[in-house]
Image: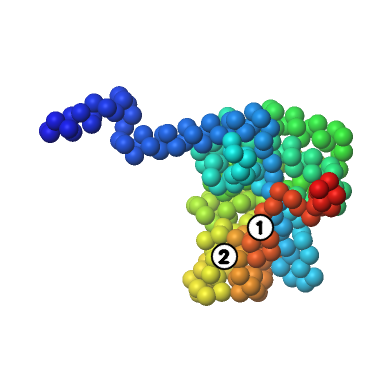
Amino acid sequence: MAGKDRRAMADVPAGAGSPLESALHRRDSGVIGMVARAVAAGEVMLAYQPVMQARPPHDTGFYEGLIRVLDPTGRVIPARDFITVVEETELGRELDCAALRLGLKALEGNAKLRLSINMSARSIGYKAWRRILERFLARDAHIGERLILEMSEASVMRVPELVADFIDDLRPLGIAFALDDFGSGDIAMRHFRQLLFDAVKIDAQFVRGIDRDADTAMLARALIAMARSLDLAVIAEAVETRGEAETLATLGVDCLQGYLFGAPTVRPPWLKPTNEAAA
């Protein structure tokens, strides 16, 4: 072994692994630190994206509230940049709590709003999350009727029995449930039938270019048929072109969500007049 190689190995701390592993560890530690700082400082917010009816009159069916944090420079950081790093940590549970609290506050302030909020199945037994829900329901027992809870397929399939009990427990409160990223993994049909979701959101890979790709259309049609067999509403996410929207509507999708209809914004329509007046 060359001397410079021995010196390079000597510079790597014991247990640090390869240089790539060390770099990934430093990156993840930085992300966790950024999110922890934002949560501690209360610099967490929701960005709202409309979910549109696929058929006339093409009204807004509801909005999805997407978690965001501020970095030390004040930039709004989307969930895709941090959620996979923190999802399995305590911070993931705290973010779910923050999303629920912000979402319920928005519902409380706008009686016409219907809103979906993301959560991980890992937060089902998290006492702080349940206390937030109970506190808002104590003030308005009907607020749950305008709340949709979204859980990803991957999250649900880790603990399907627990999710089934959770849905049964909260359904009397009027809360609806949506399975996100539908089709992205190997969902067990026996669990899918037992879970009793109200809606599914077709994963983006079965949406992009669907008007130009027969294979994508075929797979989307199969997913829609599966959902329809269980009387589930079908939502397509990541819709970016008019051609995609028209094809999905033809295939029987109920709602469409994506940049074609509007990007997520921290200044939703129901808040803009107040903000502009303040300016």
Horizontally, is 8 left or right of 47 in the view? left
Judge by depth and name the residue closer to the eye, 37 or 243: 37
Q: Position of residue 252 (x, y in %)?
A: 67, 69
Dot 2 alpha-carbon crowd within 10 angstroms: few under 14, some 14 to 19, many 20 or more: many
Answer with the quarter of the image where residue 232 lies: bottom right
Of labels 1 and 2, the one closer to you:
1
Whichever of labels 1 and 2 marks the residue nearer the N terminus, that label is 2
Give the amino acid type for the residue marked by disc 2 in the picture.
Answer: Val
* Image disc number at residue 207: 2
Where in the figure is residue 40, as x and y percent of width and height? 64, 28
Tell me what residue is drawn at x 85 percent, y 49 percent. 277
User: In the rendered view, would you say 160 is above or below 253?
Assistant: above
Image location (x, y in percent) of residue 4: 17, 32
- What numbered label is drawn on residue 104? none
In the picture, the disc for residue 263 is: 1
Three-letter code, disc 1: Ala
Q: Position of residue 98 (x, y in %)?
A: 69, 36
Q: CA distance from mark 1 to mark 2?
A: 17 Å
Residue 82 shows in the view: yes
**Is residue 118 depicted above or below 18 in this figure?**
below
The part of the image, by quadrant, that contains residue 44 is top right
Question: In this view, which residue lies farthest toward the left?
Answer: 1
Marks 1 and 2 in Cβ contact (< 8 Å): no
Give the quarter of the image for residue 63. bottom right
Q: Which residue occupies 64% across, 72% down?
A: 242
Residue at image point 31% right, 25% down: 13
